[in-house]
Image (cartoon, grey):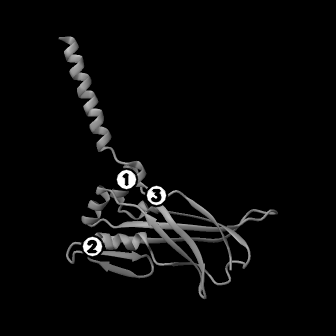
Amino acid sequence: MTYRFFRLLACQLLLAFACALVGAPAWAADGIDITRATIEAGDDGYRLNTAYDFELNHGLKDAIQHGVQLHFTTEIELTRPRWWWRDEKAVEQKRTIRISYDVLTRQYHVMVMGSFQQSFQTFDEAMFMIRRPTRWLIAPKGKLKPGETYEVSMRMYMDREYLQKPLQVNAFNDSDWRLTSNRKTFTYRAE
């Protein structure tokens, strides 16, 4: 009789463990992948052309539906290596994009902070704007020295600093609210 009891207990534990694995979040899917990052020289200066690949988990989608605004910040740094002194920081910029939902109009709003705002009918259209943002002017013409090679470092993350204070406490303790990319580095030869 005890053999049967332990066998049943072992089966139940194995079943509970399997259910926990199926219900566990996929950590790899919770990150932001930078799929494209190039710098383009133009008449007005240097623009960053990027694309990101990520999905919001159920908790973040639900938060947007209930009026919480989410902010995604992209940071970029261009440094010029120097053998005789510390590296020169030529460019250090941040840009934040906000997504929100208006329950009355049933529209999603995406705003590039300090710039423009667009409205969308669906969540997927709004997220497309965040995943494929407009080219961003990171430096005016003449800021970079033509012919010089710069080391570029960038990342994107969900900026929890913009959340309301009660939500910030929860967001810092909850891994579902930590959405970030690895730092992407590449070199750029200024034109």
Q: Looking at numbered disc 2 in the image, what kind of residue is underneath it?
A: Thr
The 10 Å Cα crowd at callout 2, few under 14, some 14 to 19, many 20 or more, is: few
- Foreground of the two, 36 or 46: 36
Q: Quadrant of residue 59?
A: bottom left
Q: Identify the secondary structure beneath mark 3.
A: loop
Q: What residue appears at the point 59 percent right and 74 percent down from the top-left corner?
A: 39
The image position of residue 173, as x and y in percent, is 38, 48
Task: Report the residue marked by disc 2.
Answer: 122
| Labelled disc at residue 180 | 3
The image position of residue 64, as x and y in percent, is 29, 65
Task: Report the residue marked by disc 1.
Answer: 169
Q: CA distance from mark 1 to mark 3?
A: 18 Å
Quadrant that contains the C terminus: bottom right
Image position of 6 with respect to 110: above or below: above
Q: What residue appears at the point 35 percent right and 52 percent down from the top-left corner?
A: 170
For marks 2 and 1 on the same chain, the one whose residue lies earlier in the sequence: 2
Image position of 141 with respect to 60: above or below: below
Q: Quadrant of residue 103?
A: bottom left
